[in-house]
Structures are given as C-alpha cells and as structure tokens.
Amino acid sequence: MESQTRIKRRLNELGLRSRLRARPRAQGRMLAPAGMFRRLPTTAGLYFPFYHDVPPDYADDLRRHLRTFQRRGPLVSWDEALDVLAGRRELAGPMFCLSFDDCHATWRDVAAPILHELGVPATFFLTTGLVGQAGNLTWQDCRDLLAQGYQFGSHTVTHQRLADQDDAAALREIRDSKHAIEDELGVPVLDFAAPYGSGVDFGDRELRAVQEAGYRSFATTLRSPMRPGDSPMYIQRQGLHPAWPIWAVRTRVHD
Ligand SMILES: [Zn+2]
C-alpha cells in the first residue's frame, strides 16, 4: 500500500521536474528561495559545477555564473582538479572545475567563446552516438574545441541509464565511446561521466568496468565538495542551468 502512494508521489515529482527542466528560468526561480539558507563556497573545497546545453538566450547568464565562481577562487582544468585530489596541488580555498555533458552544438557557438573570453578551462563529456546529429557537434567541431585547449571525456554511446543495461551492453557503452573519441580526436580519453549519474543510475559494476577500460576518473552527479584524498573514481559534480539566478546556484554549490 505504502508503495502506491510513494510511486504516485515520485511520478508527480518526476513530472514536475521534467516540466521545470523545459522551463529553466521557472525552475531557477523555484529553487532560489532555498538558496537563502546557503552561501557560495568560502572555505577550502573542490567543486565541479556542470552544465548541458547553453542556448544563446542564456549566454550572459553563463558569463555571470562563471564570473561569480571566479570571484571565489580559481577555475582549473580536469587534470589540475585530479592533481588536487591526489595531493599534488594545493587546495587553499574554494576551487572550481567546469564540465559540460552530452554533445550540444551550443558548446561551439555559445559556451566556448565565453570560456575563451574569461580564460576558463573546461571538459566536455561526449555522448558519441549524438555526434553529427541535428543540434549536436560534429567530430570536426570536437577537433576544433580540442585544438582550442578543451578536454574531452566519455558520456557513453547512447546515454542509457547504465544500471538498466546487461553486462555486455554496459561494457559497450563504456568502452566503445572511449575508443570512438580516441579514434576521432587522436588523444587518450581518460575521464568518464555516468548518464544521470546519481547513486541509482550506476553501481559497483560500472565503477569496475570504467576502471578496467582504462579511465582514471568517474564523474557522478552527487554534489558534495571534494578534498585531497577523495577518490577520482567518484567525482561529485553539481548540475546547474545557466538560466538559474545565483541564489539557485547556491542550492547546489555551497560549503
Ligand atoms: Zn547526460
């Protein structure tokens, strides 16, 4: 009986969440009041904010988010962030490491020019099956972004929830995406981000498979700040939308 109500409530929440995702400004306004009880990071911690699509309407908003982070501490590359986790680089205050998921053409048109303008490094986690599809990047776009100094990681081939796949399919998602990017870009692909990325979307099987496939890091969407000594095979990222006001950002990125 319990489950009837619970399932219904979860479906309602899911419906509300997906309606809000389609209207990111409304979603941001709804989240904002909770930001009153949070503050942007002021103490030592490594944060991994990430975005998906950056439509041109939200270019100024993304710039505002990134400038806000820059006022708090340096934005570093994925390599540098892994150095912090390994204790090879000092973590003196808040530090941020930016990434983007899926394969949006707006990374080329909107995000990259802003990153260049502000001098911000970023890693793009690519869903290889989307490359060349309408609204997404081509391999040539990816090569251009690589030449501009951005890093690439894998975000599987088809963006299925890995936990739903059988062993062979999960392995293919993890390995084939890595090999496709390596073949097309001619660089090693060492970093992986799980689709959806919460605790129910992957498990030990995926963590093992990612390590065995030769990746050095595994990114989730769990949100806590990280510190030296934390495992690179469990990177915790904070999902944001550029349309959100800073108060909504504070509900995700805070100390
Ligand atoms: Zn994704």
Image (cartoon, grey):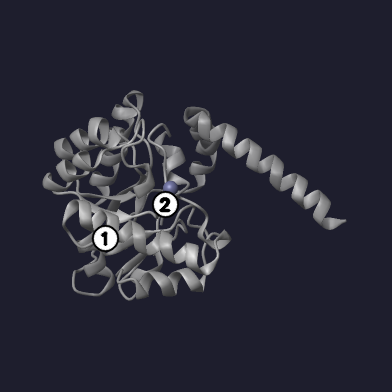
- Judged from this view, the residue extending furthest toward the top is 57
Q: Mark 1 or mark 2: which is in front?
A: 2
Quarter of image, res 107: top left
- Quadrant containing the C terminus is bottom left
Left or right of 253 in this view: 5: right
- State whether label 1 is within 8 Å of ligand 1: no
Which residue type carries mark 2?
Gln
Upstream in the sequence, badge 1 or badge 2? 1
- Judged from this view, the residue extending furthest toward the right is 1
Tell me what residue is drawn at x 15 percent, y 41 percent: 144
- In terms of depth relative to the viewer, which is nearer, 251 or 168? 168
The residue identified by callout 1 is 93
Which residue type carries mark 1?
Gly
For disc 2, the neighbor class at 10 Å (few under 14, some 14 to 19, many from 20) is many
The residue identified by callout 2 is 238
Q: Position of residue 79 (x, y in %)?
A: 21, 62
- State whether label 2 is within 8 Å of ligand 1: no
- In terms of depth relative to the viewer, which is nearer, 32 or 154? 154
- Quadrant containing the N terminus is bottom right
Quick check: 27 above or below 44? above
Q: Where is residue 76 in the image (x, y as percent from the top left)?
A: 21, 55
Q: Where is residue 235 in the image (x, y as percent from the top left)?
A: 38, 64
For disc 1, the neighbor class at 10 Å (few under 14, some 14 to 19, many from 20) is some
Quick check: 21 above or below 129? above
